[in-house]
Image: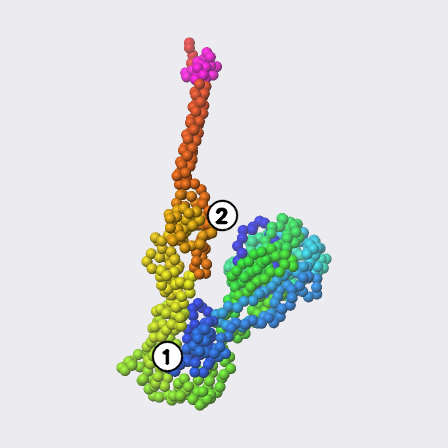
Amino acid sequence: MLSTQWTGRLWLLFLLFACGENTQDPGSCQPHPSCHECIQSHPSCAWCKQLNFVPAGESDTGRCAPRVELERGGCLPSEIMDPRSKQHVLEDRPLGNSGQQQSFTQLAPQRIALQLRPGEEQSFTVRFRWVEGHPVDLYYLMDLSYSMKDDLENIKRLGSDLLSALRNVTTSVKIGFGSFVDKTVLPYVSTAPSKWQHPCLQANETCQSAFSYQHVLALTDNASEFESRVSQQRISGNLDTAEGGFDAIMQAAICKDHIGWRDVTKLLVFTSDGTFHMAGDGKLGGVYLPNDGRCHLDDNGLYMKSHLYELSRLIPKSVVAELKEDSSNVVQLIADAYSSLSSTVNLEHSSDLPPGISLAYDSHCGDSETHGGAKGGECLGVHVNQQVQFTVRIKATTCLSGPQKLVLRVLGVGEELHVDLTTVCECQCGDTQSYAPHCSGGLGNLTCGVCRCQEGHAGRHCECKQELDPEATCRDVNDTGPVCSGKGRCVCGKCQCNAQASGPLCKCDNAGCERHNGQLCAGNGQCRCGNCECHLNFTGKACQCSLDTSGCMQEGIVCSGHGHCVCNRCQCDTGWFDSHCSRCANCPTPCEEHRDCAECKAFGTGLLSGNCSTSCNQMVNVVPGSTTDERWCQMAAEDGSLLIYLIERDERGRITLMVNGKYGTTTKQTFTLVLYLVLGFVLLGLFLIIIYRIIVEIYDRREFKRFEKERKCAKWNEVNNPLFRSAITTVMNPKYNSD
């Protein structure tokens, strides 16, 4: 309920609404014995109806698995039952541009049908556009308690001004009127006969008995009729400061035929100077039943059951504004509030969703987007003829009992989107045969690849007759535990194991293998009796290693010749590192390795200048002045100068050195230059410090001389200083007589 402290002020509450009711789990696919149980269990599950798909000795639960596993096991794609969610747009009229047309559309589509598979999310798009000049119904609901006396006089002259203001934004507008006071029981109104007949404070005032809500005028485009009917209204009174306005709002919204609401934009204007009665207040007067959401107006438009029901929830989408004391600014406030409400688009669903259905809304508002709204979608600041979109995501967690209806609407707009919901919970295998030959010559019915045996017969093909003790051979000798180790069922004296078990007595665990990245056998193999049987090109205890070596190759060499490939990744020899073992801790870099050859071949200098031709087999090209980047090596030559060169390797592995040149000075010259620079900075610093100290010293001396001069000039005695006063003060006692 709305909680507020508004006592002593006039307030205007605008409500924009639409009439009518407004107010699988994470995991993986697990085996199941039938097709319908399989597809209901998880959205990733599929069922293979192919005959003889399951090996002898295994249970038909092996038919239930993800599609990729069924195909890998040999099931033909045409034999796999894997129904998915579907949607069909049944009605989708295009959005209009003008409300002046006889028929216009603001919400699309208008009707769709959804077929949902439990656990699988489906989505659809809703479009909305405010058309220019869309019709408006406005109902004015006024508090007629005694404190609103002066406001009533202004409201009586409101009709023509109100219609004129709204016709500035639309050519089709109707207005109506209703009033309210409070619940007609103690302690809200006085039930004493004299006070009931005349609840006003002054005996000479014209006053009517208290009432909860009265519908006065149905929606009309006649301003004169509005003013005439409103002018007949009289003020009333109650005992407490709070009013029963929410009862009136509910009846005005629900009583569509009495009010005359059209399927257009509906605006309810609520005016009061008091607070509201909230949920639970009615208990003071013996009113405790929640409002039943039905119309309870009599032939005179009076609400007859305010003493029985109280409001339990608010009508959404409202704007609050403050009136002047005499309500003189009401027309402007209504126009402003209508503009504010019209610029906000709220898409919501009917209050009660079918069991097992969940919704989420993504709002696409042009410049902004919001995602994951559970109660609805919202776009703010929407202009006329601007289209906005909402993506509605819907999921069914369980099977519906039958077809269901869902209604979506934009608040304040009469148009609705109707959604027909059904769920896919049965398999339409198309292979059902009674007394099928596949089932031992007609001893059972075939459905989705599985035999359903007649009474007295058992087995995957109904080939066995049920015996007195058929389970004796499905246990170890002297074993009193469950048959088939609790992991299968005994059929014809043999164990048919579940998909996660195998062996004559189902003792092998086919789900207990090692996992990698959360997947059994890394998803690259099958678990058999506790061990992974890897697919082709995979190895390892959990089939986590790929036998492919492409990730280890560089320039046609595995791990650069300094390691070996394991699981398609290089494991480097000692001292070598990086992804392809191409670097070592103590090895020279390529730039260091080719520096001496570049220098000797290009300039005939350096450490290898004496035997350059025999030590260096690289081809060297000198390209002075060429543009360099981060690929070029910059190394110090033997004489300390900077040597710049580029290393290139062709497809055959031959190396070419592109030498840009040698630059700079020798190491000795560089050292000398650096030394002089350092000394220069030191001397400059000392010079600046000395200058600073000289300036400070001169300033201090001047200040000291000024102080000495002022001290000598000062004479602190009564002769030279008129401000001087002795420390002793003599006061004459008027009581003292010297005689």
Q: Is residue 620 visible?
A: yes
Residue 75 location in percent, x, y?
45, 78
Q: At label 2, which amino acid type do we have?
A: Pro
Task: Identify the magenta region.
Answer: 708-729
Instruction: Give the camera-side residue of 648 and 120.
Output: 648
In the image, 650 versus 364, the foreground residue is 650
Q: Quadrant of residue 732?
A: top left
Q: How many marks?
A: 2
- The single residue placed furthest to the left in the displayed view is 478
Q: Relative to 30, is 264 above or below?
A: above
Earlier sequence position, callout 2 versus callout 1? 1
Which residue corresponds to mark 1? Answer: 497
According to the picture, the residue beneath numbered tag 2 turns out to be 624
User: For numbered disc 2, what is the local secondary structure?
Assistant: loop
User: Which quarter of the rendered picture does the C terminus lie within?
Assistant: top left
> Rounded to the nearest whole Å, what is the CA distance between mark 2 and mark 1?
80 Å
Look at the magenta stretch and give its main secondary structure.
loop
